Amino acid sequence: MPPTPEPAGAGQLADLVTLTLEEARRRGATQCEADASVSRGLSVSVRLGEVDTVEYQRDRGLAVTVYFGKRKGSASTADLSSAAVLETVGKACAIARYTAEDAYAGLIEPEALARDIPDLDLDHPWELPPERAIELARSCEAAGLAVDTRLANSEGASVGTQRYAGMYGNSLGFLAGYSSTSHSLSCSLIAEQGEDMQRDHWYSVARDPADLEDAVVVGRLAGERALARLGARRLSTRKAPVAFAPDMARGLIGHFIGAIRGTSQYRKASFLLGAAGSQVFPAFLQMHERPHILKALASSPFDQEGAATHDRELVRDGVLDGYVLGSYSARRLGLKTTGNAGGIHNLIVSASDGGLAAGQFLARLGTGLLVTELMGQGVNGVTGDYSRGASGFWVEHGAIQYPVHEVTIAGNLKRMYLDIAALGADMDVRGAIRAPSILVSEMTIAGE
């Protein structure tokens, strides 16, 4: 695989951003910002031992935003030649002259800019030839199929690697960038027994290829998870405790983040409207944002506007401390940016006591549903009404009894968050939200 941009490429991107800002000022912009990036990657997939796809990816782009007073214009291009850059700036300026004034438009406040740019150890290139990537994917799938003869089919295994370099600058004098990598390995298998067919998967993702789970382990876990779902039953409609496995709990917390984003708040389109300072979770639940964890998938020294990222206690003892804001939404709310333009950075969900071990968590669940897969998008961000297709396992007296499918779980998120009864100690770190298993004391389960 051809190497992606080395540090010398960062200098080229800096020159590109500088040219963009200078041209915007020359055309009369009162403020301007530009973001340039390049990335390259390789992805390979196999199915039943045969190569399915081999893809090289190479992207580059420049986005520029200009302000003429309170009028804003934006344009972008994938052509990084000097002529294309100048043309793109011209288009952004032309757009700005025809837009309506917005009293809240503009760059972030200078005091919010990142001054020190820490090295977060995010750049770990993987010199992975396609032949080796194919070999890894094959060994992953083969290990899964070898778990049991009932694993006779596959949706495939894949290996991917990507390297990114970006540079952001604005007319406040900010100019900084960094490189990062992301590598992944995944497998999805199908278990068959008679007419019963069940699918499940597993995956690993990391900044450093040395931190990926072994391909054989990923395949075996995918196979074991698919086998465990054979013989799935439906449930009769009832109310019962519902536990969310860590990868499902991440989505549950994601709905909370969506509700406290600045855009949801100023548009008054949130079931947690004006909730800052109020109890939204039980007192044992904490949420910490930690943007500077080395090698973490959502670490960043600054946000998309150049604002410094910093450690933050988002939820203290169940009480919401504030919102997730970029500069625009902050101004609309009369607040300051929280350094979250572009999203959250390593949000850690934890219990004050550290959470329950697997056996203790199931014992606390007692009799109820453990959800390991969710389907559909039945979530209303305005009312908090929640209804999604689900599958998983029925638990009685703290022990898994049998797999469950074709049911729907329903409730209201505002009530569900307050009804969280326990957290596990099984933190899933494969995303921007690091969540453990979450137990909700009661939900409606719709089935037969």
Image (cartoon, grey):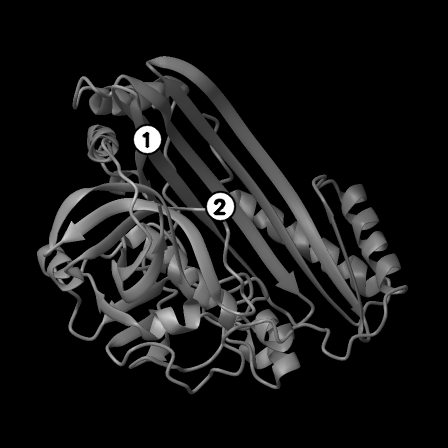
- Residue placed most toward the observer, 405 or 59: 405
Query: Would residue 379 be found to the left or right of residue 193 on screen?
Result: right
Q: Quadrant of the N terminus?
A: top left
Amino acid type at mark 2:
Pro
Q: Is residue 182 visible?
A: yes
Question: Along the horizontal axis of the image, is 274 left or right of 51?
Answer: right
In the rendered image, residue 272, in percent from the top left (x then y), is placed at 49, 76
Quadrant assignment, res 437 = bottom left
State the image coordinates of residue 321 (x, y, percent, origin top left). Answer: 41, 82
- The residue that appears at 13% across and 55% down in the rendered structure is 358
Q: Which residue is identified by label 2?
A: 7
Which element carries disc 1, helix, strand or loop? strand
Under mark 1, the amino acid is Arg
Q: Toward the viewer: 274 or 65?
A: 274
Q: Does any portion of residue 295 appear in the rendered image? A: no
* Callout in the foreground (2, 1): 1
| Residue nearest the viewer, comparing 100 with 57 | 100
User: Residue at coordinates 45% horizontally, 37% vertically from top-left?
Assistant: 162
Determine whether, in the image, residue 309 is placed left or right of residue 416: right
* Mark 1 lies on residue: 199
* Classed neighbour count for the residue bearing mark 1: other residues with Cα under 10 Å, few (<14), some (14–19), many (≥20): many
Q: Looking at the image, is 68 positioned above or below residue 34?
A: below
Give coordinates of residue 187: x percent, y percent. Answer: 32, 30
The quarter of the rendered structure image containing the C terminus is top left
SS at badge 2: helix
Residue at point 29%, 46% (across, down)? 235
User: Gap in Å between the C-alphas at discs 2 and 1?
Assistant: 43 Å
